[in-house]
């Protein structure tokens, strides 16, 4: 968990606690789209309790919990 990072809204954690099956995450690769930390994140919960093999967060802007920045809306306008 990143230093100083708070957990996201309690209802999100409760949702994952109630409905996420550990075998759906354990030792698997997880891709979170829209991962930039704004007011919390479920990533620390998933990494700590559901134990994925790999967790990658992508977003349009760099920031906390963003491993890769991707913006494809302009690719068709780029010549090279």
Image: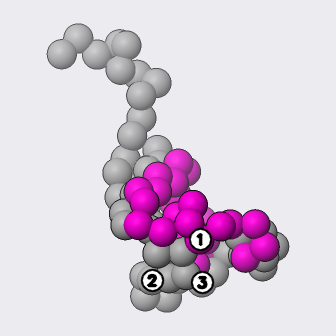
Residue corresponding to mark 3? 6
Query: Which residue is located at x 63 percent, y 81 percent?
Result: 7
- Give the magenta part as a residue range: 17-46
Q: Quadrant of the C terminus?
A: top left
The image's mark for residue 22 is 1
Using a 10 Å C-alpha cutoff, classify the residue at mark 1 as few (fewer than 14 neighbours), some (14 to 19) or many (20 or more).
some
Q: CA distance from mark 3 to mark 1?
A: 22 Å
Identify the residue under disc 2: 1
Residue at horizontal 43 percent and vertical 60 percent from the top: 28
Label 2, residues with CA under 10 Å away: few <14, some 14-19, many ≥20: few
Left or right relative to 50: residue 69: left
Q: SS at mark 1?
A: helix
Horizontal and vertical percent for residue 19?
75, 66
Q: Nearer the viewer, residue 40 or 49?
A: 49
Mark with earlier residue (3, 1): 3
Which quadrant: the N terminus?
bottom left
């Amino acid at each position: 968990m990143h230093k100083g990072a708070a957990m996201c809204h309690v209802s999100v954690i409760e949702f994952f606690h109630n409905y996420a099956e550990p075998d759906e995450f354990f030792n698997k690769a997880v891709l979170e789209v829209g991962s930039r930390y704004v007011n919390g994140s479920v990533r620390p919960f998933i990494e700590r309790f559901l134990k994925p093999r790999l967790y990658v967060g992508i977003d349009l802007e760099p920031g906390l919990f963003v491993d890769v920045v991707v913006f494809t809306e302009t690719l068709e306008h780029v010549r090279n």
